[in-house]
Amino acid sequence: MDPFPRTMVGNVSLPRLIAGTNWFLGYSHTSLAKDRFIHEHQTRERITAVLKVFVEAGVDAVMGPLAPHLEEAIAETEQQTGRPLIRIYTPAFNLDPDRSASQPDSPEAVFDQCAAWKATFCLPHQCVTDALVDRRAGVIRDLARYTAMIRERGMLPGLSTHMPETVVYADKMDADVETYIQIYNAAGFLMQVEADWVMRVIREARKPVMTIKPLAAGRLLPIVGLAFVWNTIRNQDMVVIGTTTPEEARECLDISRDLLARRIPDNPLQKTRSKNSLER
C-alpha cells in the first residue's frame, strides 16, 4: 500500500490525515454519559490498537492535549511499531501575566512538559488562543511572548482556534506560527460563521491548516463529512479525525484514500432489515 499523502508544515513532513484524540480521552460533544463511556472503554491497550492502524497506513502524527494516558499510549505504539510518532500538543495554561513560572499551570511549566514529552508542534488550545483575540483591535494579544517560549524549547508554534478571525489576525500580524487548527465540517458544528466563510479563511490562510471535527463529533457519516473536507481544502491542508476502534480508523483511512484519488468509495455498508430490498 502506498504511504498516505503528506504535506510540509514548517520543516516537518506530516501526513495529511492526523489521528485525533477526543474519542480516546472522553470529549464526545454528545453527553456526560457518552464521555464516561469513552473514559471507561479506552484503556491504554485499546488506544494503542487504534494508533497502530494509523501508523501502519503511514499516518504517524497524533494531536491532543497534555494527558498522561495519551502519552503512555503513544509511547506504547512507538515501541510496538518501531516507528516514532509526531506529537502535536494543544496545551492550556494560565494567562495571568503575573503568574509565577514555578506554578504547574504557568506557560513556562506547560511548555516544558510539552518539550519533555517530545512534542514537535505546540499549539496553545482554543481556550487560551481565543481569549487573547481582540476583535476591536484586530490583533492577538501577547502572542509573540508565547510563540517565543515555544521556539526556545525546540518546538514549532501554531494556534488552535474556534474563531476564524484568529487565522486572519495572525496572518495580518505576520505571527510566528507554522500552522493553524480550525473547526471545519459540513454541519457547521461548533463553527462561529457559515461553512463557506470558513472555507474562504482556510483557502486564503498563509500557513497550512489542520481542520478538526470533520464528522461534527459523530453527527455526520464518515463518507459525508470526509467528502466535504477533502474536496474543499488545499493540498497543503490536513484533516484531524478521532476514532474509537481500529475498524473505525481503517474505514476513515480507506474512505480518505479513495476520495483523495478521486474514486467513489466502495467500503462495506451497514446491514439492516430495512435495506434488504436494495440488495442486488
Image (cartoon, rainbow, N blue to C red):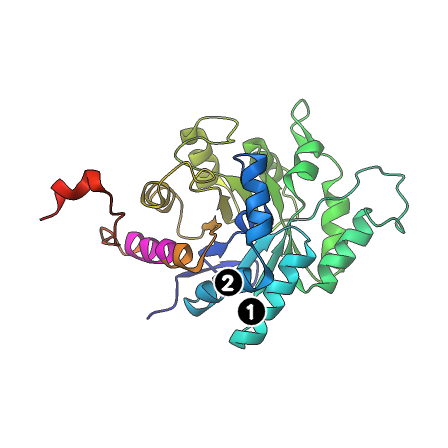
Distance of label 1 from label 2 (alpha carbons):
7 Å
Mark 1 and mark 2 residues within 8 Å of each other at the beta carbon: yes
The answer to which of marks 1 and 2 sits earlier in the sequence is: 2
Q: Say whether residue 2 is magenta.
A: no
> Residue 42 location in percent, x, y?
56, 55
Residue 27 in view: no
> Residue 168 location in percent, x, y?
56, 35
Q: Residue 51 shows which numbered tag? A: 2
Mark 1 residue crowding within 10 angstroms, few (<14) / some (14–19) / many (20+) = many
Residue 130 vertical position relative to residue 93 in the rendered view, above or below: above
Q: In the picture, which quadrant includes the N terminus?
A: bottom left
Region in magenta: 251-259
> Residue 61 location in percent, x, y?
53, 61
> Residue 220 location in percent, x, y?
38, 38
Identify the element where label 1 is drawn: helix
Residue 269 vertical position relative to residue 224 in the rendered view, above or below: below
